[in-house]
Amino acid sequence: MRAVARVVAVADGRGRTVLRELRGESPLLLRQAAAEQGVPTVYVVGGAAGPLAGDDLRLSVEVGPGAAVRVRTVAASVALPGRPGAVSRMRVEAVVHDGGTLHWLPEQLVAAAGCDHVAESRVSLAEGAGLLWREELVCGRYGEPAGDVVVATSVDHAGRPLLRQSLAVGPAAPGWAGPTVLGGATATGSLLVVGPAAASGPATVAAGGSQPRGRVLPAGPGASAAWLPLAGGPATLLTATAADAHTLRTLLAAPVDGHTGPGGTAGGPRRPAARTGVDVVPVA
């Protein structure tokens, strides 16, 4: 199955955002919901099971200058096996212009046993653009092993690379569950914040120097979380692993969800005043 969907959000000149284009095909059906905190919200509704091996799905989002939009999904996306030897693909391409803001907050991607799936995201941000980008992966449904999934994310800011990350899990990725990758965790994800809100992350500065450092945050038994400032832009990246999807979501709770992440508040992540962590030096 092949499907293409597109969202275009523009400012109306009166301080509000309108959706100039909202177009989808099954299984990528788009529905506008009530605004959240004044930001228009679009839900991606699955019009069919999947993605199944052999599916090729594409979603593009464009946010104009001064506009803001939030994109969610109504349920987790379960990558399923299909034709032998076939690969399913989901590509998301987003462009956010100067002064625009995009909140990408889908539910989890579940790597069902036997699947072979590639999830690729490419984001282009103007100098003054804002971004909240959450990705979550659950390795297998309850009581089953994980299928093969590759999650690759590429983000550019002001024409320069900001983030390049890729994770492969499943039988075709030897060592993915070992101590150097997920360490036995079955759920993992990240939250990228670009813009003024990134400064509120729990970054520290080394004594006698100006290089920012990240922090490994308290996360509880069987889980881990680390916040890292990124070189090349006003951006921070929170990554986490956990034993289940619920714990992972708690660790990656976004400010717009009204939840509290590790060392965070509903108004945004904050450095914990009474907790300590391990410093992490960011790699440029």
Image (tube, rainbow, N blue to C red):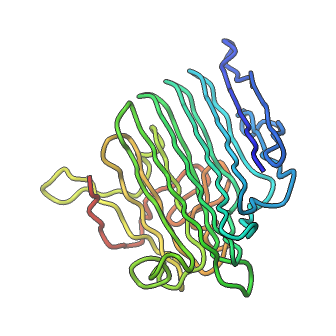
Please say if 27 is above or below 190: above
Q: Nearer the viewer, residue 63 or 119?
A: 119
Q: How many badges with numbers are in the image? A: 0
> Residue at 52% of width from left, 43% of height from top?
122
Residue 274: percent from left, percent from top: 42, 70
Q: Nearer the viewer, residue 172 or 21?
A: 172
Residue located farthest toward the top when viewing the structure as drawn:
13
Please say if 4 is above or below 83: above
> Residue at 50% of width from left, 82% of height from top?
177
Residue 19: percent from left, percent from top: 75, 25
Q: Is residue 78 left or right of residue 134?
A: right
Q: Is residue 175 left or right of residue 116?
A: left
Please say if 126 is above or below 134: above
> Residue at 47% of width from left, 60% of height from top?
238
Quadrant in the picture for residue 140: bottom right
Residue 263: percent from left, percent from top: 50, 64
Q: Nearer the viewer, residue 223 or 207?
A: 223
> Residue at 21% of width from left, 52% of height from top?
211
Residue 63: percent from left, percent from top: 61, 28
Residue located farthest toward the left when viewing the structure as drawn:
208
